[in-house]
Image (spheres, grey):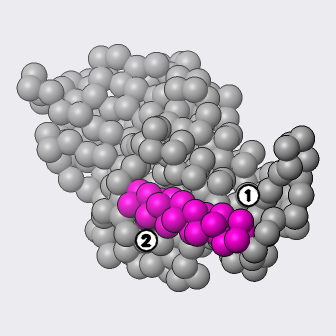
Amino acid sequence: MGLRVIAALSAVLMLTSCVLTPGQFTSELSIDKSGQFTFSYQGEISVLGFNQLIDMAAHENAEGFAGECYNDEFEERPCTEEEKEEQRAAKAAENARDAEMFKTLLGGIDPSKPEAIDDFIERVSRQKGWNSISHKGKGVFDVDFRISGNADQGFTFPMIEKLQAASPFVTIIARKDNKVRVEAPGFAGSEQGPGMGTFGALAAMGAGESGKGGTPAPAVLPNGTFTVRTSGTILTNNTEEGPTRENGEQVLRWEITPATTQPPETLIALD
């Protein structure tokens, strides 16, 4: 059963182009009217299905292969050795395809290997802005990210080397008229966010698999605060209360929960 779930997980992730999702977090974006910005994210990031896939691969290897055979009345019967061998070969080929598919999504990291978590942490730690990353368990990582740059070059978080399918949590899109649009699609906790329906499917499949002998992994859903500060001019936003003023800057703040359906967004005019 485990490797059929791997195939389902891989197919879902391919279709939705989503591997990462936020959990508990605090995030802030400060944009000066000159275009200089600083972005920070502290909290959880979950690699969807990562830990479930590792556990299921180990479970499958430990159980061995029994095969499934049926008589003319579609009742299950013992398989012959020849039938077992045929099914074992077919399953091995299917497993290899599934493993390669998910390995591609993770940019070459094989989630069935014991060192997969360490490999992922090492890759992320090499990149600028990632001050720390540690594995909390069940595919959930605790991260501290902070970076500065110029908004006219655009920005996307997270960007992880070689990762093939990561939908953005936050983007800065520069316009020709000296305006920038900030969007946070990853901070929507419902159908608007990347992969929340996907995550539900992943969690359900993982739970069903874990139920055979382990504890189901809890769903990690967006829950936190996203703040935008700017000395520019806020032209549009979708907060509940609109901008406030703090220390000479306009400030927008979104409280994100799993029930949040609209991703944060604002349009800001710079000098």
Instruction: Tell me the CA gap for discs 2 and 1.
Output: 23 Å
Counting from the top left corner in percent of width and height, residue 267 is at 30, 23
Q: Quadrant of the N terminus?
A: bottom right
Q: Dot 1: what SS?
A: loop
User: The residue under label 1 is which amino acid type?
Assistant: Met
- Residue reaching furthest to the front: 72
User: The residue under label 2 is which amino acid type?
Assistant: Ile
Q: Residue at x 75, y 74 (%)?
A: 81
Q: Is residue 271 visible?
A: yes
Mark 2 nearby-residue class (10 Å; few <14, some 14–19, many ≥20): many
Circles 2, 1 touching at the beta carbon (< 8 Å) = no
Tell me the magenta residue range. 82-105
Q: Residue at x 55, y 79 (%)?
A: 113
Q: Is residue 55 visible?
A: no
Is 191 included in the stretch rendered in magenta?
no
Q: Residue at x 23, y 34 (%)?
A: 173
Q: Is residue 30 left or right of residue 24?
A: left
On screen, residue 256 above or below 234: below
Mark 1 nearby-residue class (10 Å; few <14, some 14–19, many ≥20): few
Q: Nearer the viewer, mark 2 or mark 1?
A: 1
Q: Quadrant of the C terminus?
A: top left
- Residue position marked by numbered label 1 in the rendering: 1
Counting from the top left corner in percent of width and height, residue 110 is at 47, 72
Counting from the top left corner in percent of width and height, residue 269 is at 21, 24
- Residue position marked by numbered label 2 in the rendering: 109
Q: Dot 2: what SS?
A: loop
